[in-house]
Image (cartoon, grey):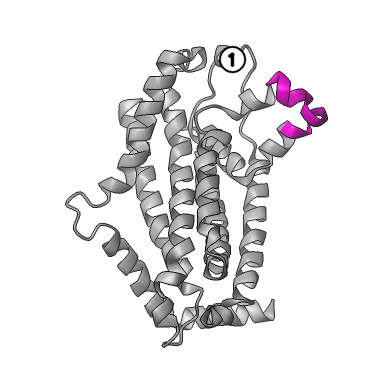
Amino acid sequence: MRQLTAELAEVWRFRALFLQLVRRDLKVRYKNSKLGFVWSIAPPLMQVACITFAFKNATTFAAKFDSYSAYVLAAMIPWTYFQTAVLDSSQSILMMYGVIRKVYMPREIIPLATSVSNFIHFAMSWLVFFAYLVFYLRAPLLPTLVWFPVLVVAQFFLVTAASLVVSCLNVFYEDVKYIVTVLFNLGLFVLPIMYLPEQVLHSPTMRHLWGGWAARIYMWNPLAVLISGYRKCMLEPPHPSVLGGNAASPFDPGSVLGILGVSFVALVLSYAFFNARKWRFVERP
């Protein structure tokens, strides 16, 4: 722990460079774009529109669900943040490889800057979501909304942890970026983005698979917990008819605190993992 504290102190000493890298990432992403930030929120909005149209017309589940688009968007925003930040971070060290071979700097500020710049876009996307929620859907603001900042912090920890590990591994094994891309392509369907986690829990197959452990393992997925937490703290539960007569599970503060703890531990371990290997980056063939 003393070593990690010393490494963090070194990062703080280079905070000016860190902020400059964050500014660079924010400027470079939409350097020649007239719409700028719009391209951060446009893809998930277009995906939500297509998914809502397809599911509303093709499935009984979505047809009964008045606020289906809000439920999908509340999942798509954190999913897009996680996906974009980790994919950007996977290449971040290699993109700065010529610099780090010649100039001393704490290597971790490179993926950290990428994570923070994506977090800024993530925060701005939520402003669009709340405008949609309040002014278009005219949905009430629930008391559980006070837990929203805790979920945001937990996700930032988790995204930064994943970014550190992936950026480090991709220096030595460039197959990592391809593996991550494939996993993300599957994640859109595996995670409860287009459907609700209760559908998984109440599924006869999942209830009996491995004696019910399959459903429990599914719900222990940190991203599934985060997506479910965002929805439940901001949106009213769907009518039982949407879930085949089953009531939606209530918002669980314990699971939110649990994912915050898990994400923090993951961040500490990933930072230790990164620091144990960062000075070997220049040995890359």
Query: Predominant secondary structure in magenta?
Result: helix
- Indicate the quadrant containing the N terminus: top left, top right, bottom left or bottom right: bottom right
| Percent of width and height locating residue 258 | 68, 48
Depicted 229 relative to depicted 281: above or below: above
Residue farthest to the right?
Answer: 211
At x 28% / y 47%, what residue is drawn? 39
* Residue 161 lies in the magenta-colored region: no
* Residue 211 lies in the magenta-colored region: yes
Depicted 75 relative to depicted 101: above or below: above
Residue 204, located in which quarter of the rendered image?
A: top right
Residue 206, located in which quarter of the rendered image?
A: top right
At x 72% / y 22%, what residue is drawn? 205
| Percent of width and height locating residue 254 | 68, 42
Q: Is residue 81 left or right of residue 150?
A: left
Residue 26, located in which quarter of the rendered image?
A: bottom left
Q: Mark 1 points at which residue?
A: 240
At x 46% / y 71%, what residue is drawn? 93
| Percent of width and height locating residue 164 | 55, 65
Depicted 156 relative to depicted 136: above or below: below
Q: The disc labelled 1 sits on which kind of residue? A: Pro
Write down the region rendered in magenta. Answer: 203-214
Q: In this view, does 117 lie to the left or right of 156?
A: left
Secondary structure, mark 1, is helix
